[in-house]
Image (cartoon, rainbow, N blue to C red):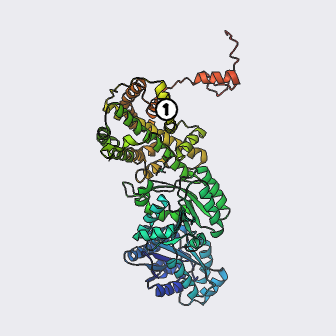
Amino acid sequence: MSFIRPVAIFIMGVSGVGKSTIGNLLSAQLSMPFFDGDDYHSQKSINKMAQGHPLNDDDRYEWLTNLNNVAKIQLKTNACIIACSALKETYRETLKRDIEKDVKWVLLSGSFDEILDRIKQRKGHYMPPSLLKSQFETLEIPVDALKIDIVQTPQKIAKKIVEELTDKSEFGLIGLGVMGKSLARNLASHNFKLSIFNRHVHGLEENVAIDFKNKHPELFDSIPFDDLQTFVKSLQTPRKIMLMVNAGKPVDAVIESLIPLLSKNDVIIDGGNSHYKNTQERIDLLSKHGICFIGAGVSGGEEGALNGPSIMPGGDERAYKMVKPFLETIAAKNNNGNACCDYIGKGGSGHFVKMVHNGIEYAEMQLLAETYFILKRSGKNPDEIAVVFESWMPHVASYLLEITIDILRKKENNHWLIDKVLDTSGNKGTGNWATIATAELGMPSTMIPAALFARYVSAFKEERIKISEAYFSESTQLTIETSDLLKAYQLARIVNHHQGFKLLYQASVTYNWDLNLSSIASIWTNGCIIRSLFMEALIDILKESNTILLNPSIISEIITLRPALNRVVAECVLEEIPIPCLSEAVNFLNAYKEANSSANLIQAQRDYFGAHTYQRIDDDSGTFYHTNWKHQTND
Ligand code: 6PG
């Protein structure tokens, strides 16, 4: 009977429920020190209660802070048990300050009459029975506590608590694919006690969990399963289960099998790339069973999942609080040491944010592919291109630029491997969803579709070969300055990020998510695929406005960079080099900076053939006009 890391067990509940008795019994059974909260009140508070007056929040603050300090000191070396009524959520916030992941709550509860009887029999205690009513009124039942009814004997209660906290796991993970395995190892290396599950598929997936456990020493205390029912039973309540299975039907199938096995207040986290609308549907379905569902975007690939991913959790905020210590502990840390994980918002917002992350990722990757292609067509070999990219690092450092340099330098039998890679790119769907979302929300985030469609064009390899023969034209060497190319790339990235964050902003307004764009930028500064120097700058920029293009320092940067972007795009067009994202950046900027656009003609055409009406610039009353455009009048 032991814990794999020191924990502070808070035995809580109203006065007279038996906290001290249970605390002492547990202390003996677990050989852990016990601290009775009653001993930590100030004399002033004791006098107040003895006179029949309940304590207020201010009276309690110092007391709770003292108990938090007791726990902190103990946790440095060993586990401990603390009895404290901890009636309100805010009191518990104080008690677990800075030690959240190592705190366990046990709520003792019973009926008013039963507890009143006990209090009346209690001798020498300063708390008069008359205060019990106010204790019941103040109690806010915690969701994240082991709940024990005091009808059983103290010995049985203590035994149950010991079994629950020492034998059972704190966190369950379902699905041991690449990402699931890395997350499990990450959790275990932070000393969380885990249950890990992978299904049994005869001849295909056999003994996956046990073999995985045996391969990695950090999983020594983890419990492997291929039977779902025993897996669920192995978890402390309320249960926290993370799904790392493929998005779509597999997620629904696992949820369906879990529903009959779970209880009220249990939390399921979907850590896959699920569609945000599916996440909302799953929240609705599970809430009918009292089960909480968190849709969490997880970025960073295999390495990020192992060493610290960026995590974007959305759903019910109270449910998030229950899984927060786990997710924030395993997440990457930003420059200030804060977790790259924070509550995103209600419903499917976490998965929406991850989808937009991937949309930005698509365009960032495409921009690098275009600059690589331009440098290649300027006569540079992969090593020379890597040297150019490396020289850009001080200006545009990013994870994607770093990995691109590695890719360009990779050789196989003395040949650059990149030259052997077939030029058709795949996708798993998130770029497609982001494109649909931007269209549905009426946001012109045009670089995501441009990047997506560039991948689609690449897929038509055979047709491209035929068309290149039919339309053959002599390819000449490009004469683009690398300094111009850097500026073009910098500016296109600004446009990409502007569009991505605008898409988030619009979704936030439409779905009432109240997204904090600056905090999302901060979550994206480490662990994820689109982490970059620019993302770090966006944390402050987005605090001021959701429109990156209107930030004064960005405006002056754009004014400096724009001529270079225009030159690069113009030369590429003349030389027939495909640059969908760079040119989209030019077109978007041109369109956005046009105070009087060509859309007047579109409105007139719509009114002509469909009587869709139009507004006039010489009438600001908001009136809509319809004209019979066919018959010219001279009035
Ligand atoms: C991440 C990645 C990850 C995955 C994408 C790739 O943030 O870790 O975005 O989620 O690599 O799904 O998507 P495509 O296969 O569509 O390029």
Q: Secondary structure at mark 1?
A: helix
User: In the rendered view, does 28 fall on the left or right side of 488?
Assistant: right
Q: Within 10 angstroms of label 1, few (less than 14), some, or many (20 or more) residues?
A: few
Q: State the residue at coordinates (35%, 34%).
A: 376
Front in this rendered view, residue 123 or 309: 309
Q: Which residue is mark 1?
A: 464
From the viewer's perspective, is residue 269 above or below residue 569? Answer: below
Residue 579, position as x, y percentages in the image: 44, 32
Residue 570, position as x, y percentages in the image: 41, 25
Residue 393, position as x, y percentages in the image: 31, 43
Front in this rendered view, residue 266 or 433: 433
Residue 251, position as x, y percentages in the image: 59, 58
Using the rendered image of the protein, determine whether residue 605 is visible from the camera's viewpoint: yes
- Quarter occupied by residue 441: top right
Q: Residue furthest top?
A: 634
User: In the rendered view, does 113 fall on the left or right side of 357?
Assistant: right
Q: Amino acid at mark 1?
A: Arg
